[in-house]
Image: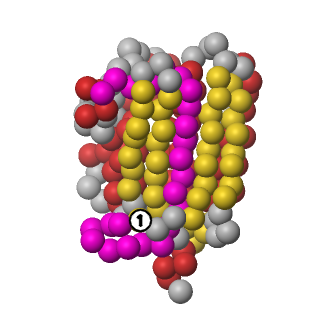
Amino acid sequence: ILESVDRLNHLIQPMLTYLSSKQNYKFKSFNIIKTLDDIVMLSKANCKARQIKVKMMNKMDNPMVEGDSKAIGQVFINLLSNAIDAIGDNGGEIKIELINESFLYEGTLIKGVRINIIDNGCGIEADSLKKIFVPYETSKSSQNNVGLGLSIVSKIIQDHSGLIKINSAVNEYTMVSIWLNSSLNKE
């Protein structure tokens, strides 16, 4: 019974998060490098078991972003987990690139940070890319997967006035790019 309750809770919690129109975000300035370092550390054992190398390439002079560090952390947990799944058990590589880069948001140029997560896994077909952020759409077959992961990621990024884009080629790579507001915008 406890296992069933735990499994149901695991299924329901993402739905509740997605359906909730108002999040209780706690916006403040935080170091995106530290957040990403913590997430990479959490996935280290899983990557080692699957012979996946994770490389972080920091090209930033200002790693501070404005937002809810826990929500943004959840975004990167989800994206890193997807990259690991895409590579599978045969070994591969995940690159995380961090760059200070301005972006256009609703007609305004925003000083920001761009984070690219690039894996050399199975890639995503063009038809699937078109509906990748649609809730309940998934290419994974699992009783614990309801197809909300990337729609939740997209919602969190939108709630942070950021952007997310995905480029991919089947059997070659997937690159997820996220732009977030730099805390420099507050000065």
From the top left corner, tell me how far across and down residue 132 is, in percent. 31, 34
Point 55% across, 78% down: residue: 184
Whether 187 is among the magenta residues is no
From the top left corner, tell me how far across and down residue 17 is, in percent. 35, 46
Whether 109 is among the magenta residues is yes
**What secondary structure is marked by label 1?**
strand
Q: Quadrant of residue 34?
A: bottom right
| Count of numbered badges drawn on the protein | 1
From the top left corner, tell me how far across and down residue 45 is, in percent. 73, 27
Q: In this view, does 171 lie to the left or right of 107?
A: right
- Front-most of 39 and 171? 171
- Observer able to see residue 63: yes
Kindly give the residue lying farthest to the bottom in the view shown.
187
Does residue 153 sit above or below 172 in this rendering?
below
Does residue 163 sit above or below 42 in this rendering?
below
Highlighted magenta segment, given as a residue range: 104-126
Q: Residues within 10 Å of mark 1 (few under 14, many from 20)?
A: some
Point 33% across, 66% down: residue: 105
From the top left corner, tell me how far across and down residue 115 is, in percent. 54, 52
- Front-most of 135 and 118? 118
Look at mark 1 in the image and give the residue it sits on: 103
Point 55% across, 59% down: residue: 69
